[in-house]
Amino acid sequence: MRMGNIWAPLARAIAATGTDRHVDCLIDLIGADIEHDLVTVTRYSATQTPEFVKHRRFSDEMVRRERRLGIMPLKRLADDEAKRGQYIAGFLAQSEICDEVGIMLADGGDWCLGIFLDRSTSTFKDSEIARLDERLPVFEALHALDITARGAEFSRTSAPTVPGASPRQEPTIPVSLWPELSLRERELVQLILAGHPTANIADRLGITVGTVKNHRRRIYEKLDITTERELFLQFFQHR
């Protein structure tokens, strides 16, 4: 799509603020002239479990990502090459995804909304990432306008806003889910599902951060998964 054709989806996105069409129109605007194959939308909180909002042409293989605002290409995802390489070799290979870029928007309280565009056969060009970076203030303004338009009738701030605060309601793992896990492993998984970071889990269980990571690795092996994304997906699908 040429630059001149961006105005139609922009007009629809403006008109949709405060309505149930907002997210769909925002997706249309973001991907208007950025070629992509798949879309997933997820809400993240520093203190609560992620909320899967919607997807387009996707196989339900959704991932829980870090809560960062802005434009997040896959190349910026991990802090080091080893972690990024593991992510690509694991989940992305299984999902037939070649590259991914995420648009992370403040969503009230400690929540953010992640809109992720995925490609199956080619990577996103630097020029396309730069285009999204340039338009980010527009996406942020539209989403902020939607939050304001909905006001008290549509609260997104159910989570406590103090970083590191305990979730108000921790998820309970059904007895029938993951019977192969030990009681200790189920306890750790429940804390992961509740949104606790690794250091917080270590403090709660009275173990080291390294031990938590070792537990995670064994849990992933038992469940035949490679990422925390798949752990959350299994939990939400079962529920």
Image (cartoon, grey):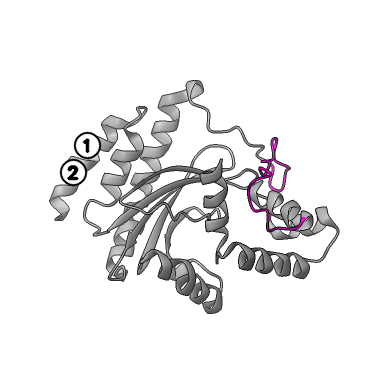
**Residue sticking out furthest to the right:** 206
Instruction: Write down the region rendered in magenta.
Output: 162-182
Element under label 2? helix
Instruction: Find the residue positioned furthest to the bottom.
Output: 82
Q: Could you tell me residue 210's position as x and y percent? A: 76, 70
Tell me the chief SS of the magenta region: loop
Q: Please tell me which residue lies in front, 193 or 99.
A: 193
Q: Amino acid at mark 2?
A: Trp
Front one among 227 and 32: 227
The image shows residue 37 at horizontal and vertical percentages of 27, 58
Distance Cα–Cα, label 2 vs label 1: 6 Å
For the point 43% across and 36% down, the residue is 144
* Element under disc 1: helix
Query: For residue 11, which numbered disc appears in the image?
Result: 1
**Does any portion of residue 65 appear in the rendered image?**
no
Residue 160 sits in quarter: top right
Task: Identify residue type, mark 1.
Answer: Ala
Residue hosting label 2: 7
